[in-house]
Amino acid sequence: MVRAPLASRWVWLLGGISVLVLLLGYSWISHGQQLENPNDTTIPSLAAMLDGLQRAALDEDWLWVDTKATGYRLGVGLLISVVGSVLIGVLMSSLSALEALLLPPLTLAAKVVPTAALAVFFALVGTGTELYITMIVFGISPALTLSIYLAAKAIPVELIDKAYTLGASHMEVIWGVVFPAVVPQIIDAIRLAVGPAMVYLIAAELYLGDEGYGYRIRLLSRRLEMDVVYPYIMLLAGFGFGIDVLLTGLRKQLCPWYVEG
Amino acid sequence: MLPLSLRIRGLHHQYDENKVLHDVNIDIVRGEIVGLVGPSGCGKSTLLKSILGTLTPTSGAVETFEPGSSDGQRVTGPGRDRGIVYQRYALFPNLTALDNVAIGPKLDETSYPFRVFNFPAWRKLRAQHRERSAALLKKVGLGDALDKYPHELSGGMQQRVAIAQALVMKPAILLLDEPFGALDEATREGLQGMLLSLYEDNCAARRAGEAPPYTILIVTHELNEAIYVGDRVIGLSQYWDWSGDGFDGPPGATVIYDRAAPVYRPNAPKEYEQFMAQREQIRGAVFEPKVSPKRGQHVDFWEAVAAEPHGIFACDV
């Protein structure tokens, strides 16, 4: 039956099977390729990838250098985007003049393809860390601001009128009533923005980086050293997943009152 | 005459060409529970918004009175002198029942700078606020649900929180906007009983020579509710005889009915005959489009009370 509940051991079993099939399938393809051409590096075996990871982490210092560079750029970019988007999004939902002023440019900016504008950013801020941060901030802030603005706008006006009858000041209505009520939606909007932020960052690193995950992947792909490239891709996915888990945990911690859906 | 809580003078309102309210004048004294009824489209919501301050009427004024003061404060926007309870509860979803009530004194008595820079004093004050709020929640029958979030409470319980939330401010008047419309019959009766017990407190305060603490205006489409809960019923209606007053078209709704309603003790049985007679009278005068009474025909609350004290006016005897 549609949406019939499934016992939890079946959920785990089926999930495990699909991951196992994925790994076995890859090994089988990789093994076939090795039999055909023992010097092939495009589809390395799982063992070769472990060796590659070891090379990147221990024999060379790539992994540390790249993680530091990419992590720093992503962290600062996200931080600036989140602080700015929350500030502007919440204020826009509350102050009609600001709303009228910023809604058109933000709607437009949200449609700009940041990867296409890379050359513009390059010309404006050069190739330093600023470029990557600019890329992330311009890439995700407009959409993030809009979704926070919409969530805050969905707070019923009754709640705001009531806050005034309880003696709230304008600032207390905005930051004491509206903002706390949309924290869960803000966290969810950030979760959705982390993916695009990583896409834009890696894209910029691919083109212009001299360190970082995008740079290393471009360099090693050209040399067909996929035993390092694949682990790098998986590590990036792992970071994205880790951030998502952290944010979900943060939401549960901060907003025990929130019911999803 | 008892001290006023609310005064509405010469209130007119029209949306573009559409005239909604015509010369509405209402005085409500401290301690009354007034039921406001009227056919749909008569401008009940417009009147309520004018009192709340979220709508500026075309002309006329609403004033509220602090206890012991005869100087009215003119309403210019929503403020702490008027409490509001909506049909759909409108509780702060991120606060527990207790904090939903305690946020009132917090917002009213403190500010951001105080809470940040004088944290120890704020902590002390907050403990007092929570104590006050807990006492009030117990009074409305929610002593066991202090730490529950709104989504964990039933509609009736949420509405009790909303009433406590408004009452903690000791407003000059508490506005209830179709407060029990979304609740089932049994829950509604429980809440009506709670309002009647607040009214008993009013009477007790009068007897003790104090100002009655609760003044309530309840907007409802349920005639029975207005008569049962209120000690006075005001009917707003666009169906009145304006033809002799030189208007070209309908001037809008005005007060067509204003009379005392029987006072019930909580859980006391309704006296059906008297109840039904008043019900039919209001239905005919206020709700019937084909009947157009003269403006003052059913408006004699003040004369009647002056002749024979009733309700809150009679409590001191």
Image: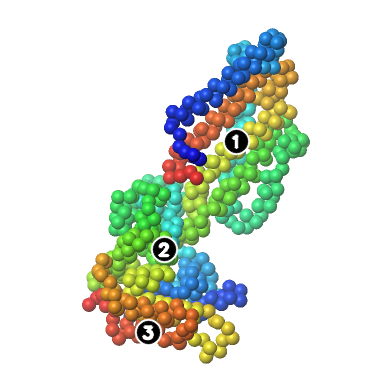
Horizontal side of A1 relative to B132 (left or right) equals: right
Identify the residue shown where x is 45% and y is 37%: A5
Q: Amino acid at mark 1?
A: Val
Q: Nearer the viewer, mark 2 or mark 1?
A: 2
Which of the labelled discs sits on residue B300, or is there none? 3
Distance in Å between CA atoms under marks 2 and 1: 44 Å
Q: Earlier in the sequence, mark 3 or mark 2?
A: 2
Distance in Å between CA atoms under marks 3 and 2: 29 Å
Chain of residue at mark 1: A
The answer to whether any part of residue A65 appears in the image is: no
* A102 w.r.t. A116: above or below: below
Distance in Å between CA atoms under marks 1 and 3: 68 Å
Q: Which residue is mark 2?
A: B181
Near-viewer residue (A161 or A7): A7
Q: Amino acid at mark 2?
A: Gly
Q: Residue B199, position in %: x, y?
A: 30, 68
Dot 3, how many residues are within 10 Å of its Cα: few (below 14), some (14-19), or many (20+)?
A: few
Identify the residue shown where x is 36% and y is 77%: B279
Q: Picture quarter containing residue B276?
A: bottom left
* B39 w.r.t. A163: above or below: below
Q: Residue B113, position in %: x, y?
A: 46, 50
Near-viewer residue (B201 or B3): B201
Chain of residue at mark 2: B
Which of the labelled discs sits on residue A194, or is there none? 1
Near-viewer residue (B36 or A54): B36
Q: Residue furthest bottom?
A: B244
